[in-house]
Image: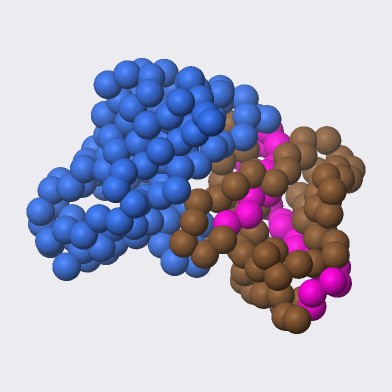
Amino acid sequence: GQNIDQPTEMTATEGAIVQINCTYQTSGFNGLFWYQQHAGEAPTFLSYNVLDGLEEKGRFSSFLSRSKGYSYLLLKELQMKDSASYLCAVADSNYQLIWGAGTKLIIKP
Amino acid sequence: DAMVIQNPRYQVTQFGKPVTLSCSQTLNHNVMYWYQQKSSQAPKLLFHYYDKDFNNEADTPDNFQSRRPNTSFCFLDIRSPGLGDAAMYLCATSRDQGGSDEQFFGPGTRLTVL
């Protein structure tokens, strides 16, 4: 079966750095997405990785290792507004997105 | 601004009373999706359209149907809502179905079944 695993919840301090991990097992791979979802709102796109390595976009970076079936989202200089769920999703061989359940990130002052 | 619009934002219906949720997009994207998302769970794909080609996920209940009368609009019909159908319903679009084509989401419709 197809599976995306990510921690259910993480807590971090304002101004700190946090890394949210995602491991996946899918039938085929056509890229990995990270989305941010604030409570009661729709997901918004953060990043896309299809090749191994690190993609940096401002305070957010995303890393991919295809051989390990592993990705992480790195958030730097955390702000209170970063409190949200972060969803990992993988495009499989049919380009269908397989979604993780999301990691709820709680930022404390 | 180009966007994905969903109406209504909040929908309350009675057990067994049909309900229709609507979605429109000004992005001129080829693909439209309907997801169901329950609290703290992954979005669950119900249907998607590539242009007018309809794709029904294998485990989508028969109680759910969809229509895409034109490129801009898509509807989700729930014929006989049950208590288990209470959820957030998300409409999304993507330019194409390539791996790098990100999905753009509407604000969602939160459905309550009484």
**Which quadrant of the structure image shows residue A36?**
bottom right
Residue B91 picture location, percent across and down? 41, 41
**Which quadrant of the structure image shows residue B94?**
top right
Residue positioned 17% across, 47% down in the render: B19
Residue B54 picture location, percent across and down? 35, 25
In the image as oriented, which residue stretches furthest toward the right?
Answer: A53
Residue A17 picture location, percent across and down? 85, 68
Residue positioned 12% across, 61% down in the render: B14
- The magenta segment: A13-37
In the image as oriented, which residue stretches furthest toward the bottom?
Answer: A109
- Above or below, B9 against B99 in this view is below
Q: Is residue A28 magenta?
A: yes
Q: Which chain is brown?
A: A
Residue A55 located left or right of residue A97 = right
- Above or below, A39 against B34 in this view is below
- Above or below, B86 against A95 in this view is below
Q: Nearer the viewer, residue B111 or A4?
A: B111
Residue A69 located left or right of residue B19 = right
Residue B12 picture location, percent across and down? 21, 60
Q: Is residue B8 magenta?
A: no
Residue A30 in sight in this render: yes
Residue A72 in sight in this render: no
Colour of the chain lettered B: blue
The C terminus of chain A lies in quadrant: bottom right
Residue A82 located left or right of residue B74 = right
- Above or below, A99 against B14 in this view is above
